[in-house]
Amino acid sequence: MVRLSDVAARAGVSLGSASRAVNGHPGVGAELRERVEVAARELGYRPNPLAKGLRMRRAQLVSLVVPDITNPFFAELAKELELACSERGYQLTLRNSMESADTEREAVLSAADHNPRGVVVVPTGGTVELPDTGEVPLVVCDRSVAGCPAPAVVSDNRLGASAAVAYLRGLGHERIACVAGPAGVRAADERLAGYLAVMGGMPGGGQLVTRGPFDYEFGMVAAHRLFDQDRPPTAVFASSDQQAVGVLHACVQRGLRVPADVSICGFDAIALSALTSPPLTTVRQPVRQIAARVTGLLLDDEAVSPYTTVSLPTELVVRESCAPPP
Amino acid sequence: MVRLSDVAARAGVSLGSASRAVNGHPGVGAELRERVEVAARELGYRPNPLAKGLRMRRAQLVSLVVPDITNPFFAELAKELELACSERGYQLTLRNSMESADTEREAVLSAADHNPRGVVVVPTGGTVELPDTGEVPLVVCDRSVAGCPAPAVVSDNRLGASAAVAYLRGLGHERIACVAGPAGVRAADERLAGYLAVMGGMPGGGQLVTRGPFDYEFGMVAAHRLFDQDRPPTAVFASSDQQAVGVLHACVQRGLRVPADVSICGFDAIALSALTSPPLTTVRQPVRQIAARVTGLLLDDEAVSPYTTVSLPTELVVRESCAPPP
DNA sequence: GTGAAAGCGCTAACAA
DNA sequence: TTGTTAGCGCTTTCAC
């Protein structure tokens, strides 16, 4: 292993000058800088991030805490975030909270111990408060937490949901059901609000709205419940693609054709949504922009006042799962 | 921030003793240990991993480099690995090589700069050699690399494939096609070998074997090619679940019923495989065991000689996508 | 513009 | 068993 002092010795300069040179500090003689750069290259010098981090009280790290990396949407987020970080020379650390607020707390805290440049957390449903990380900045992502001072970067869930439901109405649907996410999860509440805004309140006396987990299972259960009613819906807006896939399967089980008998719309635009038959109409979350915004906040020191929520626009992805009502 | 010296001062002992006490070293007086523990608790002491890592020349980190975390199988692997690491107080860092051997190289090297306890890499298809990481141990995972000294932990791909194909034969199928993975990727070669072993060589004069990427697209393309033949197969064994889903969709497009007309079997047992209609029969990779083995190698210093490949047993998951031939 | 020296928080060798 | 001390590799004052 070659240390900066080796580089300095070879270039015939002091350690301090070598440090200033390799880090591109201003006020370094051109000739000295050149000599140091050559020496560093010849020796194959690689800076030691641990030493640097210790000295600067800040590591070349960004930490991500998600409920479950196995969830395709979080995987997508992790990928974009990792990309944005490594472009700038930062490593991403990953932790799963497994939807447990306690695990999340512990994860955030131990991530902060490493003095990362920031910790990004996608809160669990049960998160009421994020721990104090002292000097380490916290950014909440995807789902915001009420009363949390950390800035949040999220999709415009409300508008996205409205756009989807408006599209369904434009197709001629009137009985549009909503398979909503769990109460308490901000993103779920907002998507439901977007749905309600377009429907003008609870349609069918609230019979058309069900709430539960964002997963496949619940989508299936909810769909069966919905279709068992006297006046079943002709379209279903689901708050996640996973739920939408569940709804789709429930339809297959009941012999309902999609989109001839029932239209289905999801949310997230995960890869899977294009691979179902028929492919799902869905609302794309601007994952790359979210990642860009987060790294902007953390690595470029973009100023944001506490309690700020940055809301990014979604995009309706129209595919074959929707058609006019029968 | 409270340093170990603060704890030492409060406990009225020297810094060295405090260090030994909090780290549970032998040869520390019970009373002293107690005093230090109390002081640490009262002060809310949290060790600084950066300082520790610098001094010990080894950080509390494990690095993972995968082709793409968005691939459900790698997400699963990352999750299990992260779980196993955090249980022992290690952080997991994540990097995507995007199936580029160059990016992978750079990723492994910069991961190694942080002096992690080890770097785990799932090689890209184009990887011919892994970079030298000096003191930092390397473990290859899921796909092994020929001629690479780093120990590998993989599934028994060959046996898994054989079991699946044997199951298909047991059902009565004779024309069983194979949608294989890309040549050069060890796991793909092995699964193909497993298929060939049961089929007793190339069936149909090799007309029933196609090779290509592990993805959905190729599964679809390959299936169409297969079914366009004079004597189409009655069953398809795909080397990945993503390919199998593609095959399934091709069948839907052609009006072939699964499993009445065609049986399909995948590989990996990703969550999606249970969510298709019909659900896919597939071969489960022992992801948790793989993760356990890897952490064993890295964190528990389990001895392995170079060029060793640890092969773990798979499990056939029988679901509705297979039935006797028409 | 450059060099010398201190010190980030910790562990481990050595002394007592 | 405990204390003292050096030093991990780096950045950053402070002199010059």
Image (cartoon, coloured by chain):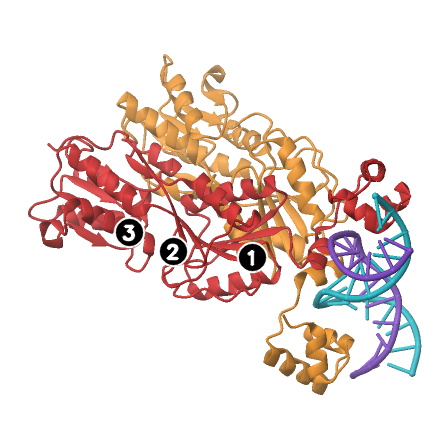
Chain colours: A red, B orange, C cyan, D purple
SS at mark 2 in the image: loop
Which quadrant is home to the N terminus of chain B? bottom right
Callout 2 amino acid: Ser
Question: On what subunit does the disc labeled 3 rest?
Answer: A
Asked if marks 3 and 2 touch (Cβ < 8 Å), the reply is no
Marks 1, 2 in one chain: no
Q: In the image shown, does A71 or B292 lie closer to the viewer? A: A71
Q: Which mark is nearer the camera, 1 or 2?
A: 2
Q: Residues within 10 Å of mark 2 (few under 14, many from 20)?
A: many
Q: Which residue is mark 3?
A: A190
The answer to whether residue A262 of the structure is visible from this angle is no
Say above or below: B57 vs B25.
Answer: above
Horizontal side of B90 relative to A6 (left or right) equals left
Question: Residue B136: percent from the left, percent from the top?
Answer: 73, 49
Question: Residue B269: percent from the left, percent from the top?
Answer: 43, 42
Tell me which residue sits at (64%, 82%) in the image: B39
Residue A14: which disc?
Answer: none
Callout 3 amino acid: Glu
Q: Which residue is mark 1?
A: B84
Say above or below: B304 vs B199.
Answer: below
Horizontal side of B33 relative to A248 (left or right) equals right
Q: Which residue is mark 2?
A: A144
Say above or below: A57 vs B145.
Answer: below
What distance separates the C-alpha of mark 1 from that of mark 2?
A: 29 Å
